[in-house]
Image (tube, rainbow, N blue to C red):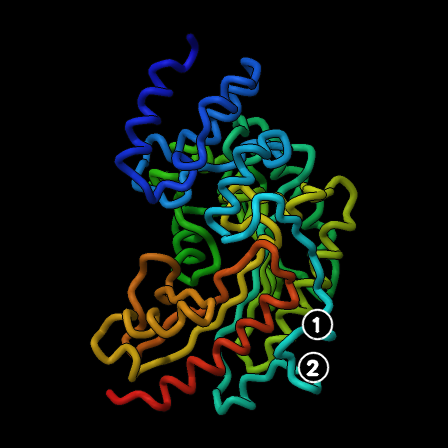
Amino acid sequence: MPYEDTLVRIAALKADHPQNIALQSFDPAYFATLNADGQSRLMKCLNSGIENPDSEMGCYACQPGDYDKFRPFFAKVLARYHKVPEDARHTNDWTLEGVDGLPANGVLDIAELGLPALSMRVRVGRNLADFPLPGSMTRDDRTALERRMMAAFDQLIADPDYGGAYHSLTPGNPNAISEDEYQALVDAHIMFKDMGADSYLTAAGIAADWPHGRGCYVSEDRGFIIWVGEEDHLRIMCMERGTVLNRVFDRLKVALGVVSGIDGLDFAMSDQYGVVTSCPTNLGTGMRASLHIALPKLTADGTDKRAKDIARPLGLSVRGVGGEHTPIGADGTVDISPSARFCITEAEIITALYKGIALLKAEEDRSGA
């Protein structure tokens, strides 16, 4: 029987790793109903969690249609992680009007909370509908997708609202940059790091063929960036230092319309689940809205533990300023973002960030050192 040894291994790992959502959601009886191709595809989705059983999620989609094709499996995964019913249906909506917690004037201005200008960022993951997802891409797929995106970037570069340049890591690409130039972009938190060091992405096939098909577009003002070839085909982000969250939110919305309006850039979507992303944690909106805020009192012990304890009930995630698993800033600066991505609208995410920051600042003001 194909996969007999793997099924035995999954059963053993399932017993030993109750936190691994993919393993806990795997049903051998459902797996047995799939044909050979379906079994092969589903096992590929699970490989990261099998090879890294300490994962919390433990799976990645590998084709744009995987969430719908393997709905009996992914519905359980999504329900466990996102705390939603198994038949949950996602709705995308960028309209702020009428969102609970939105100020009367519709402006999400953190200056009204007594905060100075802060680093603000809103990003989304997107995948092109007519390519495999990164976990199943060949080297040719990766470079073909990059070539298609370079044609799109030519249009952005010619637009005075964007300008800028595309920086490729692909050997022989006409826009290829040197190792020193790449490291400078990484150090400036503009470009992503070599994914080969990530065992989860490596086991999922997402890190394969590095650095072919990887690069980033950076606008002239460095406030609009598109990563090519990371965990998703595209990570599209807007950032600025300021106080009005609407500015980065609205700029991203407009920019997404520009990008998706370019010929050949249809984004992968699911009628049931919204925006299709490689990792189920990002499914739905694919959005992360964040800002960096100094919380010197809540981090007086040199850790973000107290901040996390307060933020978690507010639906907020706390990270180091360099991203997940990085240290907090010397002045107590942390990265704050709403945790939800699925069964929440884009407008609700940006408003949740504003509401959460208001409550977190109040706790900081009340806190003793």
Looking at marks 1 and 2 on the same chain, the residue that comes earlier in the sequence is marked by 1
Which of the two residues, 188 or 172, is positioned nearer the viewer here? Answer: 188
Q: Is residue 84 left or right of 320 when viewed as pictured?
A: right
Residue 171 visible in the current orientation: no
Residue 321 on image: x %, y %: 38, 67
Which residue is located at x 33 percent, y 26 percent?
A: 11
Question: Label 1: which residue?
Answer: 96
User: Residue at horizontal 40%, vertical 49%?
Assistant: 193
Q: Name the outermost residue toward the left.
A: 301
Does 323 sit above or below residue 227?
Answer: below
Q: Where in the figure is residue 236, as x and y percent of width and height?
A: 60, 55
Q: In what quadrant of the picture does the N terminus appear?
A: top left
State the image quarter where residue 18 is shown. Answer: top left
User: Which x, y percent locates residue 62?
Assistant: 54, 32
As drawn, 29 above or below 186: above
Residue tagged 2: 106
Q: In this view, does 329 lie to the left or right of 68?
A: left
Q: Report helix, strand or loop for mark 2.
A: loop
- Relative to 339, say whether 307 is above or below: below
Give the number of the disc on residue 10.
Answer: none
**What residue lies at 44% left-to-right and 47% top-to-bottom?**
178
Label 1 crowd bin: few (<14), some (14–19), many (20+), radius 10 Å: some
Asked if the residue under mark 2 is in contact with the one under mark 1, i.e. CB atoms within 8 Å, the reply is: yes
